[in-house]
Image: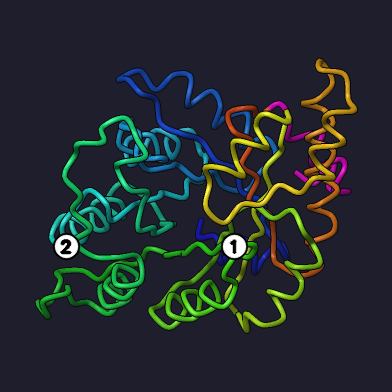
Amino acid sequence: MKLTHIVAERGFAITGEVAPPKGADPSDALAEARELARHVDAVNVTDGQGAVMRMAPIALARLMIEESIVPIWQTTCRDRNRIALQADLLAAEALGVQNALILTGDHMVLGDHPDAKPVFGLDSVQLLHVAARMRGGYDLAGNELSAPLHLCTGAVVAPEADNVELQLMKLRKKLDAGAQFVQTQAVFDPAAFARFMQRASLKDVPLLAGIIPVTSPRMARFMNARIPGVNVPTWVIQRLNEAEIGDRARVGAEIAGEIAAAVLPHCQGLHIMAQGRPALLPTILAAAGLEGRR
């Protein structure tokens, strides 16, 4: 089911996220996706997140479909030229995928193969434009397709990045290129998020606010230092410091839920990035006032 249809039918949507395995056995990733699917409408499948080599996300997405889990297949421009990028869009649809989140991708110097050659045959804005063109029945070179693309394609934005004006400009370009939904980087300041949404002028394009449960002060410091567009505030770190070590995951999940409750009036859903801990979702949803929604 397309994410846009879920939002239209239910008023808002909740998505989760799973990383493919760094190996050929998908069992653990599938188990995590099953647990997430108990609480969310769809599950993102990441593509080489952090430039770390893992199983291609299209494989896990197909396995999820076979278990009636709605995948949002993520695809990055980092490792492919424009021929391969278009071919992958067609392949994803042929395998039953209906949603694609299009990203430029983290640079390989950040990952586990820093000497890999960057490709970046297109950037995310250009690939969104290509996908829209393919929905019209033509490839990037103007050749007619035997059947048009139907993928629902989405984009990302970081509402709390240092340069908000740049983020708004990038978002406008992605919307103009044909983005049909938006998921954001982690949100920690609901007031700043509300101001961002007032300026974003999304009209009929649904936006899902990113929510990350921060489960330790160390994790907060790592995110602030290493993840662009993320700013874990000092009050979150202070609450985690005050909690007993064994209770910090629960406290972090409750904080995430409190933030989710505050941002929901300004958007069309939540994208919960549980960082491999799907058991935290019930606590997050309960704190957000969404317990028992599914």
Left or right of residue 266, residue 115 in this image: left
Which residue is identified by label 2?
82
Q: CA distance from mark 1 to mark 2?
A: 29 Å
Q: Nearer the viewer, mark 1 or mark 2?
A: 1
- How far across and down, in percent of the image, does residue 34 sit? 57, 29
- Residue at 61% x, 52% y is 230
- How far across and down, in percent of the image, does residue 241 sit? 84, 28
- Residue 276 versus residue 39 in the image, above or below: above
Whether pointer 1 and pointer 2 mark residues with C-beta atoms closer than 8 Å, the reply is: no
- Label 2: which secondary element: helix
**Could you tell me the amino acid type at mark 1?**
Ala
Image-quadrant location for residue 291: top right
Magenta region: 279-294
Give the number of the disc on residue 205.
none
- Residue at 43% x, 40% y is 65
* Observer-nearest of 14 and 146: 14
The quarter of the rendered structure image containing the C terminus is top right
Image-quadrant location for residue 100: bottom left
Which residue is identified by label 1?
161
- Residue 13 versus residue 17 in the image, above or below: below
Residue 169 part of the magenta segment: no
* Observer-nearest of 162 and 283: 162
Q: Residues within 10 Å of mark 1 (few under 14, many from 20)?
A: some
* Observer-nearest of 213 and 130: 213
**Could you tell me the amino acid type at mark 2?**
Arg
